[in-house]
Image (tube, grey):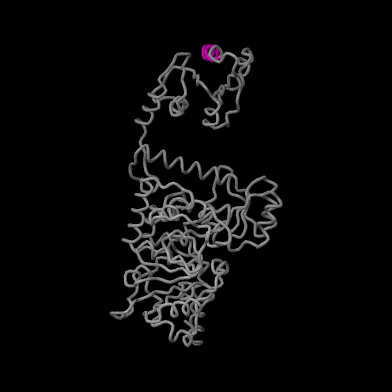
Amino acid sequence: MARVMAAALAEAADRPVLVLPHPSAAPRARPLLAAWPGAHILPHRLAAWTLLDSAAVVHLAGPARDPPDPMAALAGAAGLPLRIDGLPQDSAAIWAAALAATAWTCPFHGTPITAEAGLALLGQWRAIEAQNRRIAAVTGIAVWKRAAIAPLLASSRGLPAFRAAPGAALKRAKRDRGTLAAWASAMPAALPAAAAEAEVPLLRIEDGFVRGRGLGARFQPGASWCLDGRGVHYDAARPSDLEALLAVAEFPPPLHARAARLRATITDRRISKYNPPGAPLPPLPDGRRILLVTGQVEDDASMRAVTGKVRRNLDLLRAVRAAEPGAFVLYKPHPDLVAGFRHGRIAAADLRGLADAVVTATPLPDLLPKIDALHTICSLSGFEALLRGVPVTCWGQPAYAGWGLTEDRDPIPRRTRRLTLDELVAGMLILYPRYVDPATGLPCGPEILLDRLDDAALWRAPRWTLHRGLQGFLTRLVAGWRGLT
């Protein structure tokens, strides 16, 4: 110890020397270190990288070990000069040896991976954990969602406080000098202003674009989420983090290639937002242009944000029929409506002359190869159609509109950048959302989530939500009796 301190003080000259004794040696080290002015003992709870960020040289007590001291290896990773018992060491070689001696295993599949892939994953986890650490309170999260949300927001400080009342959540976030997270569609309109007045950062949470298996209205768990500090992706009244990202982000070749592979996986495996079971296609005519019109839940937050003239499913059908009177129009109600949940059904009498056929059970990936174009207000079905090369007309202002890939009947003037399809995919499916592996609870990439969709056991609705199935059945019966589609 004396030899190490003498070497460190001599090299430091007038600079302070920061000392991190081993926990077991700390009581004995304090009296010894008192003899060296300029030496400062640090609490052992400080993270290694916090120390290395402040260091110019790293001195360790010897002898050199195999495997090397973890701090010696990290000094090599940081590119810092290393001394052991006062003698210079090749820190880069020590770091390389530590990497070579380490076996890396994929935490999701249990298969070997490279050190580069392992370090990249650890870096992603570290960045997510640092973001989560700032979140002090959460509001607007339904009780049935909290178990799925917990891994999304986990950090070294534990879970943030869940509060049903927005005011209580804001008060807790202000007290802890942290961020307030709120489920966007359940957030009171006054909350953003209240958070700004309290000088509390506000983070909006919403479902991601590849949700999982099953319907959220049936209380099926999700594993894809969007956390946005500016706005929310479905409300074009104000920019969101996604819009800002798409407007300025760099898309280097490796990211392009990854987006192309992801798009191919989605299309080849017929993946959509809800991934329902298959059903037969309806008969389609030859020689006519075939259009698919996708309905939406009319009381959904994304529909409440619509500001254009087309705001209801019936409005959309009328607009499409007026735009293309000779086309064969397929109307596909939203899956939540078909299941008996939410609002937006259309009376069969109102559909006459507007829709030539109604498709309910046929999954969207089975329909898209059969159509010439898709019309929607702001449904994610338009993005799914783009992935498969189908022309899309947007009558609202969804996140994927305005980038030169859609025909926009309600343009967004501030979106002026032209994107390629894979750049849009990279932004919307890789860079912007967060994913949680339903098998391990760990943060993951979209590729892992797509793999997990094959395991139906991971996507079971909680038993206590079985009443939702009965509710949907009864609602469907009533709707059928009233002649609603």
Q: Does residue 199 belong to the magenta stretch?
A: no
**Extreme-left residue of the structure:** 286
Residue 193 in the image, given as x and y percentages of width and height: 68, 56
Residue 228 in the image, given as x and y percentages of width and height: 55, 53
Question: Count the marks: how many?
Answer: 0
Q: Is residue 256 above or below residue 344?
A: above
Which of 259 and 188 lies nearest the eye of the viewer?
259
Q: Residue at x 39, y 78 (%)?
A: 330
Q: Is residue 169 above or below residue 306?
A: above
Which of 3 and 387 lies nearest the eye of the viewer?
387
Majority SS type along the magenta span: helix
Q: Residue at x 51, y 78 (%)?
A: 315
- Left or right, 83 with reference to 142: left
Q: Which residues are magenta?
A: 1-8
Among the 4 quarters of the image, the one containing residue 92: top left
- Left or right, 109 with reference to 303: left
Q: Does residue 7 belong to the magenta stretch?
A: yes
Which of 145 and 482 lies nearest the eye of the viewer?
482
Q: Is residue 152 above or below residue 370?
A: above
Residue 156 in the image, given as x and y percentages of width and height: 56, 42
Residue 198 in the image, given as x and y percentages of width and height: 71, 51
Q: Residue at x 60, y 45 (%)?
A: 134
